[in-house]
Image (spheres, rainbow, N blue to C red):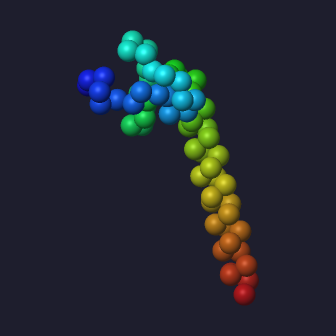
Amino acid sequence: MSIGTRAAACTSCGKRLTRKQWFYRNNKYFCNKRCWVTERSKVAAESAAKKEAAAAKEEPQKTA
């Protein structure tokens, strides 16, 4: 992988990625493992909120 094909900044915090230090998980680049964990928990919270919103939207339709 060349430097030109990877992102220049961390997906989570936006910090510039250095040549020697970067963390790649789930098709995204992070500056360290902590940013990856933060992003993972943020995505999990967003998906849980979407599921709750969908369940709340479905609830009135089921009773009608």
Q: Quadrant of residue 56?
A: bottom right
The residue under the point 49% across, 22% down is 16
Figure label count: 0
Picture coordinates of residue 25, whole percent (x, y): 43, 31
Picture coordinates of residue 54, whole percent (x, y): 64, 66
The residue under the point 34% across, 29% down is 6
Residue found at the very far top of the displayed protein: 20
Picture coordinates of residue 48, whole percent (x, y): 64, 52
Determine whether 20 is above or below 15 in the image.
above
Q: Quadrant of residue 21?
A: top left
Residue 32 appears left or right of 25: right
Tell me, yes or no, if residue 36 can be seen here.
no
Determine whether 56 is above or below 13 in the image.
below
Q: Nearer the viewer, residue 64 or 9?
A: 9
Residue found at the very far bottom of the displayed protein: 64
Placement of the N terminus among the 4 image quadrants: top left
Q: Quadrant of residue 7?
A: top left
Determine whether 38 is above or below 18 in the image.
below
Q: Nearer the viewer, residue 32 or 61?
A: 32
Residue 39 appears left or right of 63: left
The residue under the point 68% across, 81% down is 62
Picture coordinates of residue 14, whole percent (x, y): 54, 29
The residue under the point 29% across, 27% down is 4
Placement of the C terminus among the 4 image quadrants: bottom right
Tell me, yes or no, if residue 54 can be seen here.
yes
